[in-house]
Image: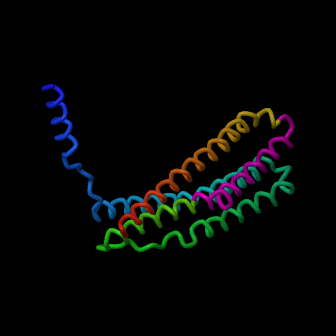
Amino acid sequence: MRDDLREKSIKAIWLNQPTEIPPMTSKLIEQRSRELRAKTRRKLIGTAAGPLAAGILYVYSMKEFAGLRQVLQLPFAFALVWSFAGLYFLNRGMWSGVMPGDAGLSTGLEFCRREIERQRDLVRRTLLWSFGPVMLAIGTFMVALAMVERGIFHGLPFLTVFVVWIVSWFVIRFREQRRLQREIDGLKVIEMENRN
């Protein structure tokens, strides 16, 4: 009986303790916003890798496969032009977004959500405007290897790495999109709670 009473009083004390909810201050939101913005900028700078990869493969193939220049020139030129157009379309409207200075909690959350949405949109656009031209350039290079006598056997390790890279690229992008969508949904919930 005494143990029951003691247990109930401990339980009552435990349940009546104030819970500490970590405050989401405007400073924390501003810091998170700056981190998100820096991450978006790094991703945008990384979009230059598409034209660079297409250009390197173009120059290397024109030098290495001199006998196939007539066949390879058009696909490589198209991949290069496509990748430069992709640079424009990937970066269009992505460098804007003024950081709210001393704005309230709602505005900071809204900025974070918009920044994450920009990252999600960038991941979606990358498939068409960056990955596509690189795939065309690599595919053209693989065709050139196959056209050269016994070249496909020398290119087999490259083909294996290429296939593994494609699969891992899609897995990574799919996971990244899901993570970004979860973050967006979480911020929308916090914004709704903040409005009430």
Considering every residue shown, the one lying at the far front of the view is 1
Residue depicted at 71% across the width and 50% down the height: 60
Residue 23 in the figure: left or right of residue 155: left
Residue depicted at 39% across the width and 58% down the height: 35
Q: Position of residue 69 (x, y in %)?
A: 83, 54
Position of residue 91 relative to residue 120, above or below, is below
Q: Position of residue 37 (x, y in %)?
A: 43, 63
Q: Quadrant of the N terminus?
A: top left
Residue 103 in the figure: left or right of residue 49: left
- Asked whether 151 or 97 is in front, the reply is 97
| Magenta residue check for 137 | yes
The quadrant in which residue 153 appears is top right
Magenta stretch, overall SS:
helix
Q: Quadrant of the C terminus?
A: bottom left
- Asked whether 32 or 93 is in front, the reply is 32
Q: What is the tally of numbered marks visible in this picture?
A: 0
The magenta stretch spans which residues? Answer: 123-150
